[in-house]
Image: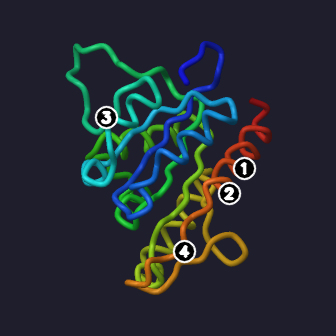
Amino acid sequence: MNAPGRPVLYIVVCATPRARVIGELVELAAGRGWTPCVIATPQAVRFIDSAALAELTGYPVRHEYKDPDAPDVLPDPDAILVCPASFNTINKWAAGISDTLALGLITEAIGMGLPLVAAPAVNSAQAAHPAFERNVDELRAAGVTMLYGPGVWEPAPPRSGGTPFPWDLALNALDEVRAGLGT
């Protein structure tokens, strides 16, 4: 999957049930010409098979900051897809908190002008929290494509198993963002 000349996509995965099958998204992204690299939140590491994802991508799954003098093991990203994006990550991201590698990369990416797409994985009770809608709007205002709302994706009730987020919706949105930027 890590062929020269292919754009690099960081897939930031958060601790949600959909994270368990993130390999499906990695394979679809690679099939669309991306070189995918997986960045996991510290809690998401418990939901994913890091070894299988490393084998699939050709890169280790990163979830912690590296030592300052250590070389980076991942190529620089051309775009970042935060999918699935948890309630916690969306709220911290909008507040500018970067207390994990995943948050550090996505907060910095706003200032770098990288194409950013986020696919929230929240339930309807979380979405009803007043901070959530404000933070979705805040991230949109910062240039993040948020795949959330009527006609896009709507959350299911708590403890219902939710509605699986369609991976193609996220990848299509990323293609549209990149086309709009001329990349």
**Front of the two marks 3 and 4:** 3
Residue under pointer 3: 51
Circle on res. 172: 1
The residue sitting at 41% across, 55% down in the picture is 19
Circle on res. 169: 2
Judging depth in this view, the residue of 122 and 101 nearest the camera is: 122
- Identify the element where label 2 is drawn: helix
Whether label 2 touches label 4, CB < 8 Å: no
Going by the numbered disc 4, the residue's amino acid type is: Thr
Going by the numbered disc 2, the residue's amino acid type is: Leu
Which of the two labelled residues, at mark 3 and mark 1, occupies the earlier sequence position? 3
The residue sitting at 62% across, 42% down in the picture is 28
Could you tell me which quadrant the N terminus lies in? Answer: top right
Residue under pointer 4: 163
Res. 66 image quadrant: top left
Going by the numbered disc 1, the residue's amino acid type is: Asn
Which of the two labelled residues, at mark 3 and mark 2, occupies the earlier sequence position? 3
Whether label 1 touches label 2, CB < 8 Å: yes
- Identify the element where label 1 is drawn: helix
Going by the numbered disc 3, the residue's amino acid type is: Ala
